[in-house]
Image (cartoon, grey):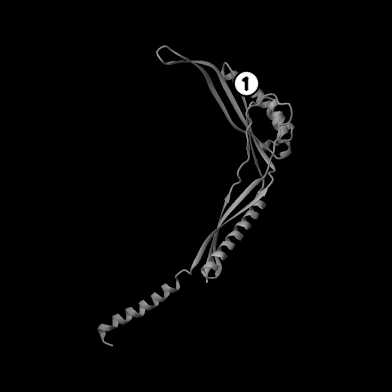
Amino acid sequence: MTRHLLPIALAAAVAFPALASAADTQPPPRIIVSGEGEATVAPDMAILSLSVMREAKSAREALDANNDAMAAVIAAMKSAGIAERDLQTAGIQINPRYNYTNKADGSQEAELVAYQVTNTLSVRVRDVDKTGEILDKAVSLGVNQGGGIIFTNDDPKATITQARKKAVADAMAKAKTLAEAAGVSLGKVLEITDQNVAPVPMPMAAKSFDAARSAVPVQAGENSYNVQVTVTFELK
């Protein structure tokens, strides 16, 4: 072989293995599908939002009145079996209240009338059947705002696992249908990712808290847990 052809031959010898290696590393054909699964369970815990609002001429007087009322509510919650860890102050607000008078020049004159102090307590009720009773007791002791309820589950892992299995089965069924329609076969699973979707909370808000005659009727219903998965299959 002549000397000037030697570099070309060497370059070809190097290039062909490189092309073969590149062909070997090409990813196999694949299909990506999504699946959804849902599982329901009765809630075993209610989260209440209870607020006490008191008004007085001074902020100090309003705060003192609010403190007395909220202390009675907290004591009643504990006597009803609510644990200390399930009682949490969610916020305290102190706001002035004004009366506005229209003046002849079109402006308004503000007169400070009183101060309003609102203390909000978050209560986890682990015995859902006692939710109405707890609400009734809170109102009788001075709770006059709030009333929001969210029904949830303390440990939804088993329900989420059930939803996840349904989601994977749904994805596999979709992949099989698509592969058969395309005239190919499914190979091994290459990748699975999932996304938990939180249950839609079931809220209940009281319009007002007047005198309560009996325990508040409460329906807990069911919580629905949803899972979405994305599965990548190899095609053969």
Q: Is residue 227 above or below residue 4?
A: above
Residue corresponding to mark 1 = 64
Residue at image position (67%, 52%) is 158
Number of residue marks:
1
| Image location (x, y in percent) of residue 65 | 63, 20
Q: Nearer the viewer, residue 79 or 229?
A: 229
Residue placed furthest toward the bottom? 1
| Image location (x, y in percent) of residue 211 | 69, 24
Residue placed furthest toward the front? 181
| Image location (x, y in percent) of residue 122 | 63, 34
Work out whether residue 9 can be spotted: yes
Q: Residues within 10 Å of mark 1 (few under 14, many from 20)?
A: some
Residue at image position (33%, 79%) is 12
Q: Amino acid at mark 1?
A: Asp
Residue at image position (62%, 21%) is 64
Rendered image quadrant of residue 80:
top right
Q: Secondary structure at mark 1?
A: helix
Residue at image position (51%, 68%) is 182
Work out whether residue 75 can be spotted: no
Q: Nearer the viewer, residue 92 or 205?
A: 205
Q: Is residue 51 left or right of residue 132?
A: left
Q: Is residue 171 above or below residue 154?
A: below
Image quarter in which the N terminus is found = bottom left
Q: Nearer the viewer, residue 98 or 38?
A: 38
Residue placed furthest toward the top? 104
| Image location (x, y in percent) of residue 33 | 53, 60
